[in-house]
Each structure stands twice: as C-alpha cells, then as structure tokens.
Image (cartoon, rainbow, N blue to C red):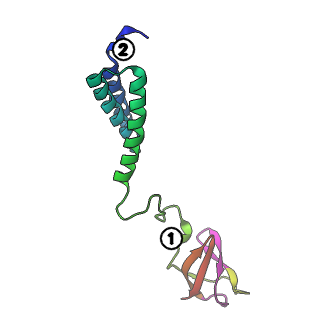
Amino acid sequence: MPDWLLTHNGWLWAILGLVLIGGEILAPGVFLIWLGLAALVTGAVVGIFGLGWQAASIVFAILAIASVAAGRLLTRRRGEEPDAATGLNDRGRQLIGKVFRLEATMTGGEGRVRVGDSSWRIIGPELLAGTEVKVVRVEGSTLVIEKA
C-alpha cells in the first residue's frame, strides 16, 4: 500500500464523508447523509487513534449500520409503526367511506362497482342496480359495502 495512503488515511475518510453528504444533494432520499456521517466519524477516529485501513474499514462498517438505523428512527413519523401503509399506495384503503352507485344488481352478496377506470369486486347485502353503496372496509382486493 502506498505511504501517502497510510499517512493520510483519516483525511481520506473525511473526504469520502463529504462526497457522500454532497451526493445526497444529487440523489435525495436521506440515505447517503448517514453513510457520509459514518465516514466523517471514521476519519476522526482514524486521525485520533492512527488505525490502519483494515481497522478503519471495520469501524466504518459498524458506524454505517448504526447511523442508518439511527437515521431511520429519527426520520420515522411519531406514533407510526415502521413501514405502516399511509394509504398512498393502498388504493383500497383510500376508498373507505366513499359512496358509489351500483351498475348491476348484486347476486349472492357479490357484485362489482366501477371506480374511475377500474372495476372492484364488492361484497355485502344484495342490492339493486342504481343503489348507492358506501365502502366500509377492505378485505384484500375486495371492498365490503353497505347501503349508503
């Protein structure tokens, strides 16, 4: 390994940290900043204790995992479970409470309702075509309805 790499190892970690933090501007997503902070701390540890590149890599790996985990905890909304569905990508959940008009009579407690450009399977009481129904909950990809 070249001598300059061994003597400036701490500065190289600091530069890597700044590059990663700067990369967050180009690829926003609040991920690179945590790796950048881990690299900056690694640079400080290497500068203080004079660690070799092998030990510095291990310190960086540990700090990277810890900082990403801490970052996830800090950026998670309060009172929300991790990865809880917010309804953004859960179309069925967005339909709860909405009222629609049946296009066809329900038979056997099942039918279909038109929502925008899609058709949803519905279950509930047998109702005639033209009846307004309200979505009360979602079971998988099936809407459970009641008379509005």
Identified at 26% across, 24% down, the residue is 48
At which x and y percent is residue 141?
63, 70
**Quarter occupied by residue 113:** bottom right
Q: Is residue 140 left or right of residue 61?
A: right
Circle 2 packing at 10 Å, graded few (<14), some (14-19), many (20+), is some
Circle 1: residue type: Gln
At which x and y percent is residue 23?
38, 34
Measure the alpha-carbon separation of dots 1 and 2.
Answer: 57 Å
Q: Quadrant of the N terminus?
A: top left
At which x and y percent is residue 94?
50, 70
* Whether residue 58 is situated above or below residue 87 in the rendered picture: above
Is 40 magenta? The answer is no
Circle 2: residue type: Leu
Closer to the eye: label 1 or 2: 2
Query: Quick one: which residue is furthest to the top in this view?
Result: 3
Determine if residue 99 is in view: yes
Q: Is residue 55 left or right of residue 140?
A: left
Identified at 46% across, 64% down, the residue is 86
* Whether residue 110 is situated above or below residue 50 in the rendered picture: below
Secondary structure under the numbered disc 2 in the rendered image? helix
The part of the chain drawn in magenta is 112-131
Upstream in the sequence, badge 1 or badge 2? 2
Circle 1 packing at 10 Å, graded few (<14), some (14-19), many (20+), is some
Q: Which residue is mark 1?
A: 94
Determine if residue 27 is in view: no
Are dots 1 and 2 in contact, CB under 8 Å?
Answer: no
Secondary structure under the numbered disc 1 in the rendered image? helix
Q: Nearer the viewer, residue 113 or 142?
A: 142
Residue 6 badge: 2
At which x and y percent is residue 135?
55, 80
Identified at 57% across, 87% down, the residue is 146
